[in-house]
Image (spheres, rainbow, N blue to C red):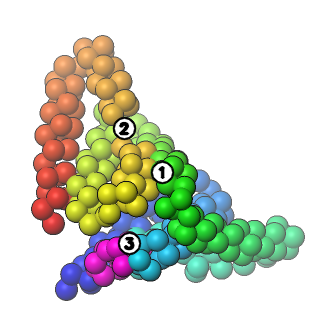
Amino acid sequence: MKNGSAVLIGGFSGGILRAALGLVVVTPIATLLVNLVGAFLLSFWTYWGIERGAFPSWVNLGVGTGLIGAFTTFSTMSTVTVGLLSTNVVLGLAYLLVTAVAGLAMAGLGFWLAKKVGKAQWIMIGVGAGMGAWLRWQLTQLWKKTRIDWPLATLVINLVGSFALGLLSQYLPAESGKFWTTGLLGGFTTFSTFNVELISLFDEGRKGAALLYITSSYLGGLLLAWLGMQL
């Protein structure tokens, strides 16, 4: 039951992230990006986490089979390539070549970094932080398309990150898990943006919105971090 639920929740999250990126970036590029990032992440997860037996099976399934598996897409890549080939053979072949070569290279990079993590942990933290910041930027750009003048994107990012860190802190080794904790989730969440947005709300005279933002951020963050630590 737990394994199936983990795959379901992870797959749902991966699919949403892929769809969100598709709204920000044109389809051929978006598909290429998710597949390259996914190839790196799954390779790293496999040889750093699964191979070392660092996590319970449901965590491995939720992250690998669910989240990363659903984030990438072979079928869309095939369809996009056929579409490009039908309009421009050279462009279609180039797209296929870049996908194949870069995908293998990213998987190789994930494998290499997983083997080197103990010797160059600071590299892994930097890579994780960069990925987290990139994902936060993508979600923020998506939120801007709604034209809603309230910082819900940052709130959701910080709440999700608080829950995820609380959960992973119970299972990840303190040192070797820093790619995900200090790196990915540290780069994904943002304390500085939260405070700047809060000041902006006060500056605009929107005291009610500011109080709602600060209350939901702190209370929600603490509650979700605690909840994650209980699972």
Between 19 and 127, the one lying in front of the other is 127
Quarter holding residue 170: bottom left
How far from the left and from the top, in percent, is residue 202?
26, 17
Instruction: Please state, as top left, top right, bottom left or bottom right, where the N terminus lies in the image.
Output: bottom left
What type is the residue that disc 1 sits on? Ile
Above or below: residue 1 compared with residue 112: below
Q: Residues within 10 Å of mark 3 (few under 14, many from 20)?
A: many
- Can residue 134 be seen here? no
The Cα atoms of the two marked residues, 2 and 3, are separated by 23 Å
Q: Which residue was labeled with disc 1? A: 125
Q: Which residue is mark 3?
A: 63
Specify start and end residues of the magenta stretch as a single range.
Answer: 53-64
Residue 46 point in image, percent of width and height? 47, 76
Q: Element under label 3? A: helix
| Vertical order, 62 against 185 (above or below) | below
Magenta region includes residue 57: yes
In this rendering, the answer to whether 59 lies above or below 136 is below
- Image quarter for residue 227? bottom left
Give the label, 2 or 1, closer to the camera. 1
Q: Secondary structure at mark 2?
A: loop
Residues under numbered marks 2 and 1 in contact, where contact means CB atoms less than 8 Å apart: no
Residue 88 in the image: state x and y as whole percent.
Answer: 84, 69
Q: CA distance from mark 2 to mark 1?
A: 16 Å
In the displayed structure, does residue 72 sit left or right of residue 198? right
Q: Residue at x 16, y 26 (%)?
A: 211
CA neighbours of label 1 inside 10 A, class few (<14), some (14 to 19), many (20+)? many
Reading the image, the residue beneath label 2 is: 190
Q: Amino acid at mark 2?
A: Thr
Q: Are marks 2 and 3 in contact (CB under 8 Å)?
A: no
* Image point (14%, 52%), residue name: 226
